[in-house]
Image (tube, rainbow, N blue to C red):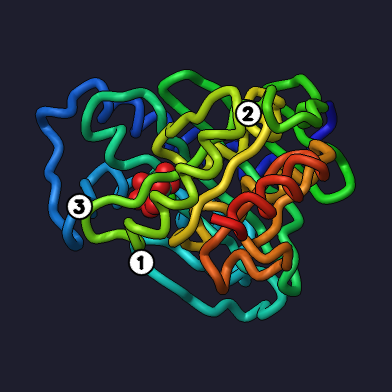
Amino acid sequence: MARSALLNVMVQAALKAGRRLARDFGELENLQVSRKGPGDFVSNADLQAEKTLTDELRRARPNFGFLREESGEEEGADKSHRWIIDPLDGTTNFLHGIPVFAISIALEHEGRIVAGVVYNPATDDLYTAERGRGAFHNDRRMRVAARDDIHDCVIATGVPHLGRGKHKPYLGQLEKVMGEVAGIRRMGAASIDLAYVASGRFDGYWEEFLSPWDIAAGILLVREAGGFATDINGGDKMFDTGSIVAGNEMICQRLRKSLKSA
Ligand code: IPD
Ligand code: CA
Ligand code: CA
């Protein structure tokens, strides 16, 4: 599988930041952790990973802008390109010693995601995609699952928690979907949920109250694996609405219908 120079830069940055994250994950007791809001933590692992990613990406493409979870937005001299970064997606898992977390890096060009990397350093799983060039799990091409009967499907979701999202309407959605599917999963890292949809492990996924950095890379993984990723209304406003529904065309549609009727 030949990677473009740009994708290579992204992969190298993720691997470098990942080495440090994996080390920190093995020594959780030494981490400094602070609270950003109710149920929302940041550790020096998140901050260090974001710094490494910023340094590496800036060195390779000095003019590109940034949208980062921890240090926010920074306009570049080149206004058409920006990196969208979550340095540690799944912080709660990380802090609890659960090896389900990832670095997520996307490159946006004129408002369109053109490259994405999701890397879990605890398991060394690397998911990559470039627009028009397919999606890969390590070196293997990914395809979304072909199941078309919702009753056979395993569907991932994100459950709102303390300080996050509206809990009552979510319970309505869950009640509706859980009665229609073979299984529900909650991984705790949106980027990994989307990577699992892309690789065909999950048949579908929905969540609300997300930020662009949670999903930017994962959306491209799903689309390049032949799947669909939309907002909850079937549109393309995932970043504005914070909502996402993903799967193959049929399951994505079917999930949206269930969520609408909840
Ligand atoms: C979180 C994870 C989680 C989702 C949360 C996100 P973070 O990101 O993606 O799965 O349910 O809403 O904020 O805070 O761990 O980077
Ligand atoms: Ca996140
Ligand atoms: Ca994060």
Element marked by disc 1: loop
Q: Mark 1 points at which residue?
A: 71
**Local secondary structure at mark 3:** loop
Relative depth, front residue between 71 and 224: 224
Establish whether ligand 1 lies closer than 8 Å to the Cβ of label 2. no
Q: 248 left or right of 56? A: right
Q: Which amino acid does label 3 sit on?
A: Gly
Q: Name the residue under label 3.
A: 39
Q: Residue at x 60, y 30 (%)?
A: 181
Q: Which of marks 1 and 3 is in front?
A: 3
Whether 204 is drawn above or below 213: the answer is above
Q: What residue type is labelled 1?
A: Ser
Q: Which residue appears at 46% of the width and 42% of the height?
A: 175
Q: In this view, does 84 lie to the left or right of 121?
A: right
Type of residue at label 2?
A: Phe
Q: Are marks 1 and 2 in contact (CB under 8 Å)?
A: no
Quadrant where the N terminus sits is top right
List x then y, in percent, for residue 106: 62, 54
Q: Where is residue 88 in the image (x, y as percent from the top left)?
A: 39, 44
Number of marks drawn:
3
In the rendered image, the vertical position of residue 190 relative to residue 164, given as above or below: above
Q: Answer with mark 1 or mark 3, whichever residue precedes in sequence.
A: 3
Gap in Å between the C-alphas at discs 1 and 3?
19 Å
Mark 1 → mark 2, Cα distance in angstroms: 32 Å
- Outermost residue on the right side: it is 132
> In the figure, is residue 41 to the left or right of 72?
left
Query: What residue appears at the point 65 percent right and 70 percent down from the top-left corner?
Result: 237
Q: Is residue 142 visible?
A: no
Residue 69 is situated, as x and y percent measured from the top left of the image, at: 40, 61
Determine which residue is flagged by label 2.
202
